[in-house]
Amino acid sequence: MARVNRRLTRASRYSKYAGGPDPLASPIDLSEALDAIGEDVMAGYSPESAMREFLRRGGKDKAGLDELARRVSERRRELTQKHNLDGTLREVTELLKKAVLAERGQLARDVDMDDSDRMLAEMQLDNLPASPAAAVSELSDYSWKSSEARADYEKIKDLLGREMLDQRFAGMKQALENATDEDRAAINEMLGDLNALLDAHKRGEDTPEQFDDFMERHGDYFPENPQNVDELIDALAQRAAAAQRMRNSMTQEQRDELDALAQQAFGSPELMDSLAQLDDNLQALRPGENWGGSERLDGDEGLGLGDGTGVFQDLADLDELYEQLSQSYNGSQMDDLDLDKLARQIGDDAAVDARTLQQLEKALRESGTMKRGTDGQLKLTPKAMRQLGKALLRDVAQRMSGRQGNRDLRQAGAAGERSGATREWAFGDTEPWDVTRTITNAIVRTVGDGGSTGAGVRIDIGDVEVQETEGRTQAAVALLVDTSFSMAMDGRWVPMKRTALALHTLIKSRFRGDDLQLISFGRHAEVIEIEELTGLEAQYDKGTNLHHALLLANRHFRKHPNAQPVLLIVTDGEPTSHLESNGEVFFDYPPHPLTVAYAVRELDNSMRLGAQTTFFRLGEDPGLARFIDTIAKRVGGTVVAPELDDLGAAVVSSYLGSRRGESPSGGSFDGMFGRGWGY
């Protein structure tokens, strides 16, 4: 018995680290996730949906939920296409053939045997039924002449007993190989005590002490190490249900054969009675398990009863994992993922990827990048908007890097932004001294002249260096973005939002003295906050009301009379609506002359306010090109026709040039975009 127990309880001395977060795991990088989520939010997804979409897709170096689900599905398909359910019958048939062949050989060699006895034995062997179960039953009373044949026949009974037990208790087939009568008696005793415990539990009469006593006596048979009777029942019921599903999946002929063979298991009908009672108890205690399912297995590799039950358990695990990874059921959470089961079924690397996704979702929810609004929906926080804006601004900078020859505008005065560079002081400079560079210059000069620094250093006027600053003139910036339906329909919706967010981030972080107003215009116009614009969904709204947008922009400029007005207009259509004096919106297509006149009048007002105007024309509409070319010349503005990927760089460059007093058409930015500057 001790030998059997050692086989059942053999385990590693080590276990998985469970003391908190994995100390060897790489830190969670939110930047990639936030960029992807921001893109989807700007495309019209809710932040919650965008986050779940990213978790499904995964990152550049980590598999997402969809990829993990695909691997789970592939593993399931592999199991069903590899195996079939007649492994035990095949093994019984092979042992039976081997025993009969050995017996025939012995009969032929035994010259001392009575001829009539030999003929009777050969006749019995020749007339064995085709059914393995019937043949095994008929040979139960056969007087074997060959010890080898008798041993093979006894292996059939031993095999059947071990397979029947392996169906209920994983590992029994190997553990009970070459089992003694004492081992079999111990198994029968365990089954009797187990059924008594389950009967008491059904009646509500079991006690913790009864469970503890059972585990003390028979715990070696349960490597799962259940801590209470419910955990014991769960483990047993899951395997018993898998065994039943395997049986349901067999043909009627296979079931009949196995039922008949089962009576020969260990040569002990009591074993089958105990197992039948166990199955009844488990079905009564766990009726919610899948006892009625079935599965078609079409492979070539035969499964024994125990191994087949294990495969059906694997199939159930894979189905459960697929559902967890789909996250499509009500109340689904990333914490629902069973990482141990995932590692067991498709590998440790899959569990690592899934754990990373869990940590990523938790970090997104807890890092301050997302919060629930009053409506209960997740929203991007200002912190997330800043991070996203910085990422977009980096992309803009990369596109601009090395492609524009900006003139260096330096202006004395502490009001400018420090550039990080220094230069020698000149008469009239009021920039702050760079103390480190100044003292270093003095020390180098003193030592070079042969002097000593022990008594201090004397600073000459030639040692002084000042910190360079860029000229700062406050700007009032109005970014007008077309939100008519054509922008979304033609794929310009997200680039427009990316552009607005990049410019907003630049001004809020680099040019805080400037005042940016975002104005959206479709059928009507409105001043819009960046968070609202970022999450704005496309709507079928006829009308491009440039007139209303310019009214709002000019009002913004008038509120800042001492600032340089900068007007940036992003559009893909001619103006087709305007605001009437009574506040109603007038719409007509093709553009009504009155609508055009109202828009031109407000552009003239912008010009009188001193606005530097740039039009960013999207699309190839000839009518739009003619209209914008004409009004740009009228107000001394500039026209840019960037590719969509370059829209952000174009707008940011125009803003920087306008606030420095440069004209985008003056040559500083020539060749920056594929379509070029200026019309």
Image (cartoon, rainbow, N blue to C red):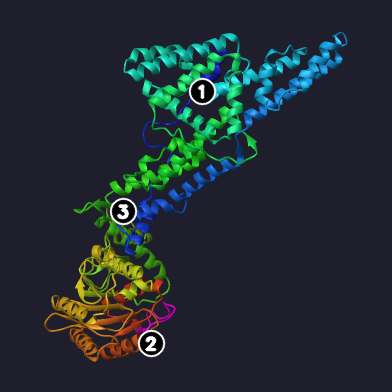
Look at the picture and state if 89 lies above or below 203: below
- Viewer-side label of 3, 1: 3
Indicate which disc residue 11 carries: 1
- Residue 480: x %, y % from top left: 25, 75
User: Is residue 258 visible to the viewer in this orientation of the structure?
Assistant: yes
- Residue 24: x %, y % from top left: 43, 38
Give how far apart the Cα atoms at labels 3 and 1 are.
43 Å
Kindly identify the amino acid type of the residue bearing the numbered disc 1: Ala
Location of the C terminus (image quadrant): bottom left
Q: Secondary structure at mark 2?
A: helix
Residue tagged 2: 622
Determine if the magenta segment contains residue 671.
Answer: yes
Q: Residues within 10 Å of mark 1 (few under 14, many from 20)?
A: few
Indicate which disc residue 48 carries: 3
Q: Earlier in the sequence, mark 2 or mark 3?
A: 3
Kindly identify the amino acid type of the residue bearing the numbered disc 2: Pro
Determine if the magenta segment contains residue 492.
Answer: no
Give how far apart the Cα atoms at labels 2 and 3 are.
41 Å
Quarter-of-image position of residue 617: bottom left
Total number of numbered discs in the rendering: 3
In the shown orientation, is residue 12 left or right of residue 579? right
Residue at 78% in and 17% down = 103
Region of the chain picked out in magenta, as a range: 665-679
Q: Main secondary structure of the magenta part?
A: loop
